[in-house]
Image: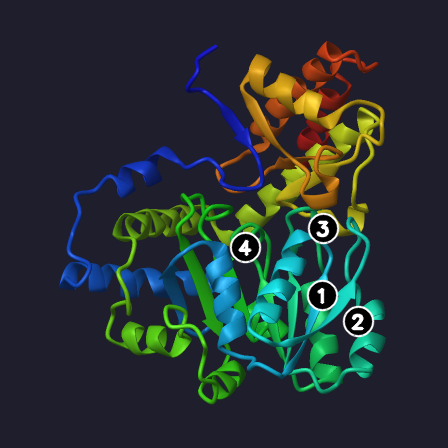
Amino acid sequence: MFADKSILRIPGPTPIPPRVMQAMNRPMIGHRSGQFSALLAETAKRLKPIFGTEQDVYILTGSGTSSLEMGVVNTVQPGEEAAVLVSGVFGERFAKICERYGIIVHRLEVPWGEAVTPEILTPFLKERPQVKAVFATHCETSTGVLNPIEQLARVVHEQTDALFIVDAVSSLGAVPCEMDKWGIDILVTGSQKAFMLPAGLAFLAASERAWKVIEQVKPLAFYLDLKAYRKSLADQTTPYTPAVSLVFGLAEVCSMIEEEGLPNIFSRHVLMRDMTRAAIKALDIPLMTKDQYGSPTVTSLNPEGRFDAEELRKVLRTKHNVVIAGGQQHLKGKIFRIGHMGYCDPLDVITVVSAIEMALKQIGTDVTLGAGVKAAQEVLINHV
């Protein structure tokens, strides 16, 4: 095997296309130069269709978590109340950020692997109409659940005057997310997943409704003061030093997205999800989520004692150079997760399924070689 030919199939960071790597290797330019200002302004505009918004999209240097924190600290003040929808690790992260800033948090928790539904959310918010914001996760990366954000947004606005703030870090760019049409007030994401870049950029857009609140809030954060980003973007710059090379890469990513077209990108991700789920079912490995809420970007599996998830991951990594993700928090060592987003196509899915079959055989699991591959191939053939 080639040591440098690893097949990375985790839910972030994801593989980087060669043309994006080439773009990031461009000679450095001044971050306060006219050349960079033009690049930043144009690239920010190109992000709007991906967000499904006419509002400005702000680019900040930081991980996806920085955009989550920006969404919190600019909208809710210490002592005010917020609702957080928790279906896994990243819903819980929103709650922890709120609590760090002295916000009173009302958690709506569902079992990991299940989605937050309108039927659950409606009575929860009816009892808490005073909340200033409702925080939700679109794709819960830790479980592979895609929460029904459009329907949840409707409930939020029917039951409260709260802002609806959504983490789309592992969904945006691969899954439809119509910020303006659905009534999302703040939408945030990061660069290292469907955007096919290294970690290091985060993106945020806010509705006019959200800006009325933001203008009244004096955030406790300095670097994450959203008003500073709005003022700077109006001048085609950033308030603090940007990651210039990553913005070069982002512009190239925008070109790739525009060339393939968002509808085709969404269809490709649904196809890869359906191939993966069909393969796993054929191998008789339990899926963590129902088909209705299975994410097009990541699939989680729970062997439930049939085999050791960590042993499988080790054989995949050491024998086949295939890297998949394990579980998080209380699911660590119990489940494994397959990422299929960004620079990934249906044949990549077949490769990973084939490797999983071989690895299962190698760790002594009773499995029929080719069963999962055949199921994935049938989904692909019928799609084509």
Image marks 2 and 3: residues in contact by CB distance under 8 Å: no
Res 102 → quadrant: bottom right
Give the image location of residue 73, x and y in percent: 50, 74
Q: CA distance from mark 2 to mark 3?
A: 16 Å
Image marks 3 and 1: residues in contact by CB distance under 8 Å: no
Query: Does the image show residue 309?
Result: yes
Question: Sequence-wise, which precedes: disc 2 or disc 4?
Answer: 2
- Mark 3: amino acid: Val
Q: Which residue is mark 3?
A: 145
Query: Does the image show residue 53?
Result: no
SS for dot 1: strand
Question: Sequence-wise, which precedes: disc 1 or disc 4?
Answer: 1
Give the image location of residue 26, x and y in percent: 21, 42
Rendered position, 119 above or below 18: below
Question: Sequence-wise, which precedes: disc 4 or disc 3?
Answer: 3
Callout 1 crowding tier (Cα within 10 Å): few <14, some 14–19, many ≥20: many
Q: Which residue is mark 2?
A: 121
- Mark 1: amino acid: Leu
Rendered position, 28 above or below 324: below
Q: Which residue is mark 4?
A: 169
Res 238 → quadrant: bottom left
Callout 3 crowding tier (Cα within 10 Å): few <14, some 14–19, many ≥20: many
Q: CA distance from mark 1 to mark 2?
A: 9 Å
Q: In the displayed structure, does residue 34 sit left or right of residue 108?
A: left
Q: CA distance from mark 1 to mark 4?
A: 16 Å
- Mark 4: amino acid: Val
Q: Residue at x 51, y 47 (%)?
A: 194
Q: Residue at x 14, y 64 (%)?
A: 34
Res 135 → quadrant: bottom right
